[in-house]
Image (spheres, rainbow, N blue to C red):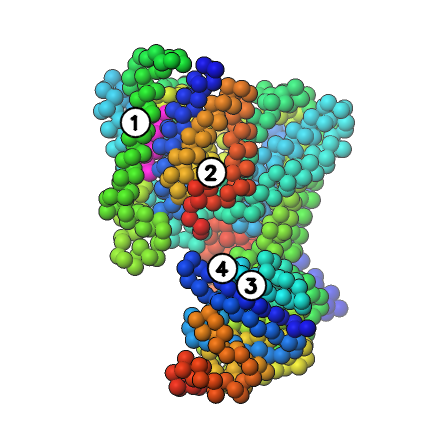
Amino acid sequence: MDAFLNSLASGLIVGSLYAIMAMGLTILYGVSHVFNFAHGHVAVVAAYLVWFAAVRLGLALPVGVAAALLVMVVLALATYWGAIRGLLRRSEWGFGTLLFTLGLAILAEYALLELFGPRVKSVPAVLPGSVRLWFGRLALNDLFLITASVVLMVLVGAFLKRTLTGQAMRAVAQSLPGAQVVGIDIDRIYGATFIFAFVMTGLSGVLLGTKTYMTPHIGWEWMIKGFVIVAFGGLGSVPGAIVAAFLLGVVEALVTLYLGAIWIWPAWLVTFIVALWLRPQGILGGRST
Amino acid sequence: MRGAGRRLMPLLRPRNLVLASVGALLVAWPYLGADRFVLHVAALTFVWAVVASYWNLTNGFAGITSLGNMGFFAIGAYTSAVLAKELDLTPWATMPVGALATMALVTVLVGLPVLRLRGIYIALLTLAFADALPSVITIFRAWTGGGIGLLGIPELLEDLEKWQAYYFALAFFAVAQAALVLVVRGAPGLAFVALRDSEPFAQALGVDRFKEGLRVFAISAFFTGFAGALYAHLLGQISPAMLGIEQFLMVISMWMLGGAGTLLGPVLGAAIITFGNEYLRVAGSLRLGLLGLAIVITVLFFPGGIMQLVGRARGFLTRPRRGGSDPDTVDGAALPVGSGSETGEGR
Amino acid sequence: MSVLEVSDLAKRFGSLEALRGVSFAVEEGEVFGIAGPNGAGKSVLFACIAGFYRPSSGSIRLDGEEIVGLGPHQICHRGLVRTFQTPALFHSLSIRENVLIGARFGGAKEDRVEDILRFLDLERVAERRAVNLDLFTTKRVVLAAALATGCRVLLLDEPMAGFSFGEVERYLDLVAEIRRTCGVTILIIEHLLDVLIGVSDRMMILHHGQVLFSGPPDEVRRHQGVVDVYLGGGTGG
């Protein structure tokens, strides 16, 4: 029973991190219809930067995180204005952006490999130590992670609902022509969306980096997990992604507990196919396009 | 006689003469002093050219963004290898079985669910399919050898020589390319051009996207699976590394750099990447960086790949004489990635 | 038995009711004209019949068989083809190949293609790629491709929009010829009331997604509702 509860808790924690990771992906897709295949690598790059700042340079963790997020903003702007903006003007933009982000992912992986080597690394825990609870020990870092995730989710919700930029992003997601008619500057909103997505994704990478290990290759795994969550929840739907992330986090933990880690991927795939079969629009229904 | 002459004339067009000479050269190559290493790489090139060409069939011609073709390859390779090893069968029997098994599995497991979806969902589900296979291979490690791989797979002949392997691969390549031309120029090819040009009109005229998609998927799976089986029996060993990201990227860049939606592009791409990869082995992880750079540059600056450059060069050479309205060159050169018209080849 | 029988058809897009309780029947071999102001639901009606939209309720019978729920290609295989108001040909193919698509995928014999090309006077341009064609040629290619499927019911959505007066005459001759030689039943949407009255055996006027008038063409002008909708001008241009 304790093992089960432990698994459940760990599933919920990982799920909350997946939720943060998936949010950037789903909002980027919802607004711009660009599917970012470098998504996982964005997360890994941020995590490596924080590792570099904290472990190699010995800086305080918040300083490292701030620096990493600044790099994310620059990367986001460069990606959108340098490439995606032009690709979106082509008739085959879907395929073009897919391949471009794929190429970007490879370049990121190569850069990480060259700069930091192939060895496994971890971001230092934010809060070391653990507390004793009725079903076992809970690392303080895990407690921090789940709190941070929930706070981030609330902040994202507020950003999308309350701020002008957030509202414009939602307007573009609902109808691009409609948004243009009311005078929304599409380039500005797409740029903002890329920044938002890269920062969120980078944060999720840093948080995940404290919970699990990372290598330059792990970006692919994170990307695919992110997309399964997003597809499961409905591409473009934020609440859907959150629900799906928790669900899949728990599924992953329970599969690991009862069947072994090797079954994680088959389990994810089966879940995904079943989900698409039952609800092609995702569990909470995205937009119908 | 005039009729016969008219039918013969297209065969004598420069493009076909060039292709015939290249074919003759490929047949004669082992006698022209190619060493064993070159023949080995060339045999691999033929296998990868088939995989890249049929990947391009789904993505470049039919507009179905499949990312799971390395999965098809692995299913063919493992099915044939395990059958030949465990049941002591000849590869000549297990290769077709492997190809058919791939076709059946892929059509039912991937084709049926995937083709009801659109765009990015297809890409992601096919990618997830291929990504789940290493786990499946590990689960069945009693037969598949798990992560270490499968060694001692029966070869096509006892003590297979490199020149023999070369000719087997060349023959397979020739058959696969002929079949591909039939598909692209035949009903499925016509259907996909129609669906891409104007989907509603095509549907109104009775084109069934699902049926044609499934057919193309099945054909692609068959030849990709066959290529995998041939690969296994040519090398005598396989491992889940074939499902790794590097192999995936290498094959995807073959048809992309060569020219998506053309017949010749993926073959050229396969030759460049396969030979480049073998000669750059010393460069190690730099190859990964080069591949990424090549993909990014191709997408941004010449989305039609090498065939676009060829088309441009040809257009430049022929324009003063034949005028700008020649669809063989001008329109072919302007094609974006994945637009899949075969005009780049010269209709 | 009517070739095409539509009963109590409704189509809603959210809160918008594009069609409400539309019922009519088309007899074999007739030309059935459909008119109505913009937004009356004419094109939505065609889209529902041809399987591009799924109706919210109601039934559509082709030769007595229900076709609601079938896809466009399946309905084409049963002998009903629609055309589009703004035609998009297969621009990377030749005109002959455009027509061939209809024959090959519509389930008819491919040897009819040459006859159809000749019939629509497209023989000389058959090898040209279907780009930058003039409107009249484009519309003839559309007709040719549709006929090549071997269809028995043809839905023409404003086929003469943008035509000159002379082209309208020639197109109407073609329609009459098709009807006479091929025995095809034709439903035609047209906003020019005069043209429609001249060509139709029976007519229907749609307004706000409902049938406002249904009957012989010579009664259209005397119908008070129709006169009101067309604002007294009556001729509609």
Amino acid type at mark 3: Gly
Indicate which label's residue lies in the foreground, 4 or 1.
1
Eyeballing the image, is B75 above or below A79?
Answer: above
Q: Residue at x 64, y 67 (%)?
A: C62
Q: Position of residue B330 (x, y in %)?
A: 48, 60
Magenta stretch prevailing secondary structure: helix
Amino acid found under the numbered disc labelled 2: Phe
Quadrant location of residue A143? top left
The residue that mark 2 highlights is A232
Residue A208 in sight here: yes
The quadrant where residue A142 appears: top left
Secondary structure state at the residue bearing disc 2: helix
Residue at the spot of label 1: A148
Give the letter of the chain under mark 2: A
| Residues under numbered marks 3 and 2 in contact, where contact means CB atoms less than 8 Å apart | no
Q: The residue marked by circle 1 belongs to what chain?
A: A
Question: Which mark is first along the chain, 2 or 1?
Answer: 1
Mark 4 = which residue?
Answer: B331
Range drawn in magenta: A197-208
